[in-house]
Image: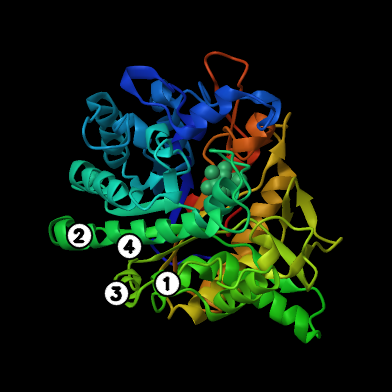
Amino acid sequence: MAFPAGFGWGAATSAYQVEGGWDMDGKGPSVWDTFTHQGGERVFKNQTGDVACGSYTLWEEDLKCIKQLGLTHYRFSLSWSRLLPDGTTGFINQKGVNYYNKIIDDLLTNGVTPIVTLYHFDLPQALEDQGGWLSESIIETFDQYARLCFSTFGDRVKQWITMNEPNVLSLLAYDLGFFPPGVPHLGTGGYQAAHNMIKAHARSWHSYDSLFRKEQKGMVSISLLAGWPEPADPSSLSDQEAAKRAIAFHLDFFAKPIFGDGDYPEVVKSQVASVSKKQGDPSSRLPEFTEEEKRTIKGTADFFAVQYYTSRLVKHREDTKGERGILQDVELEFLTDPSWKSMDWVHVVPWGLRKLLKYIMDTYNNPVIYITENGFPQSDPASLDDTQRWECFRQTFQELCKAIQVDKVNVKVYCAWSLLDNFEWTQGYNSRFGLFHVDFEDPARPRVPYSSAKEYAKVIRNNGLDGH
Ligand code: NOJ
């Protein structure tokens, strides 16, 4: 179970989930500040990220955890509204710049490669007030923010993620309204937001390519979530088709434009058109790219960044009227296999990761792949002895190793989610993904390693599962 020499072993966090300091040193509010402050039980026990892990003031403690694990990579995100309080480059908050400069410099001094996400769900509120991702004007604003980050940090940061899970965000925030701004636009908002996100990503990749790449020699990608859909009845043609639709709407919706031919998958286009028609709408609810846009979107990623947590069985279902929003368009239902072990919403299916990686290799011309997130949640309270959870990681590493050694998938980096227990969005602090336990009752927010952290450190030292 040895991994290729030089394989990258990382862990990940995101700004709103760990930093706290929500209004410190000139930071502007993000949509998550607004949403959590409004209350209304949309978040578990109305919890907020006001303090979270306190990483804005306790970065040194995070660095100790990183060193204890022996990570080769650390993935974190920049808080857009900490750098640009109103989201635009009209005013740059120098204290925010200093904070991230210190993180980057400390990582490099300790031989840890930073992977930096520009935007991880925490849109500046000022931009949401102008329509957020539903408005086309955000494409230019995002590009200006990206350019600022490339020019400020790109002398040292060589691995960039423009956006985290736009496929999840567009659905939860702009279609279903579960995430801020909290207003549902069923069947339309998710598509509109996704359309603008793809264009904004592409624009910022071109900015990097034309203005920074020559000098900085870095790489830019976008992190997409992908669960693995397995046909519920493998011998049923309609379940097989349903499984194809599942991955098309979920992963390929973003991956095909960016890594393929610049356009949405055919099956997505035909499904949305036909369901729109059934609903009495003569034109499809799915926006279209112009030929010019397709040309500029195609090929705008330097590696494939994917996040995997779980798998589902998929069954064809025509009558999806009970579903909400764009979920109606996919015409399927998700099931689970009772034999799968579950940790909260994560059904533990390590072989799903192997199948997913093979799918990406075959569909997108064998790209370099970074797994920018993978992990397992524990409900609060969680025991420091998390042997069961480590077993999930161990089996996942076995499957990852087979993907690399047997299937020859080109995976270069694996990042565990997460370095620390943190604010798990609408689940608040009730869902603990950390390798380090954080006591959210204690003002000092002590970080204590779970058993999994000690085991992960051994894997990193041995570059694989052998030797212990
Ligand atoms: C993916 C998201 O990027 C991250 O923010 C979240 O905490 C994890 N999934 C776990 O749900």
Tell me residue 83's x, y (percent): 30, 32
Tell me residue 219's x, y (percent): 29, 60
Calculate the distance from the C-alpha at mark 4 to the C-alpha at mark 2: 18 Å
User: On the image, which quarter does residue 279 sit in?
Assistant: bottom right
Q: Earlier in the sequence, mark 4 or mark 2?
A: 4
In this view of the protein, can residue 351 be seen by the observer?
no
**Label ID, residue 257:** 1
Q: Which residue is mark 2?
A: 217
Q: Earlier in the sequence, mark 4 or mark 1?
A: 4
Calculate the distance from the C-alpha at mark 4 to the C-alpha at mark 1: 10 Å
User: Nearer the viewer's eye, disc 4 or disc 2?
Assistant: 4
User: Nearer the viewer's eye, disc 4 or disc 3?
Assistant: 3
Q: Using the image, determine if residue 309 lies above or below residue 18.
A: below
User: Nearer the viewer's eye, disc 1 or disc 2?
Assistant: 1
- Front-lying residue, 162 or 411: 162
Q: Residue furthest top?
A: 443
Q: How many marks?
A: 4
Q: Using the image, determine if residue 325 lies above or below residue 304.
A: above
